[in-house]
Image (cartoon, rainbow, N blue to C red):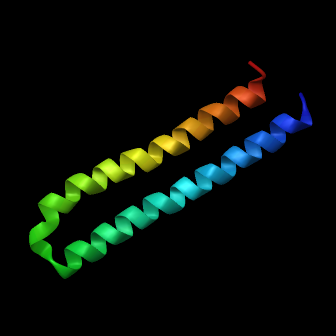
Amino acid sequence: MEPMAYIGAGMCALSMMAAAWGVSQVWTTIISTVGRNPQVKKDVDIYGWAGFAAVEAIALYALVIALVMLTGQ
């Protein structure tokens, strides 16, 4: 296996770490928003799940790219 594949997989791991940070920021913002104004929970909840899905999709794409690089296909 080429050493560059391991470096690329490490870069993908960094992007997954950034996606985890993004997910935590999404939920932190939702919790603080609902804490300040509980009546907007229904509106904010939908956008929160959409934001979570978008950020998590980035992490899943990075995982797939890392696995493809490590398996050499």
Where's residue 11, x and y in %? 73, 48
67 vs 57, left or right, is right
Residue 28 in which image quadrant: bottom left
Q: Single out the residue that lies furthest toward the bottom.
A: 36
Where's residue 20, x and y in %? 52, 57
Which residue is painted at 29% across and 51% down in the image? Answer: 49
Which residue is painted at 51% across and 43% down in the image? Answer: 58
Q: Single out the residue that lies furthest toward the left.
A: 39
Residue 30 in which image quadrant: bottom left
Q: Single out the residue that lies furthest toward the top.
A: 73
Please state, as top left, top right, bottom left or bottom right, where the C terminus lies in the image: top right
43 vs 18, left or right, is left
66 vs 35, left or right, is right
Above or below for 73 versus 41: above
Where's residue 68, x and y in %? 69, 26
Please state, as top left, top right, bottom left or bottom right, where the N terminus lies in the image: top right
57 vs 73, left or right, is left
Which residue is painted at 20% across and 81% down in the image? Answer: 36
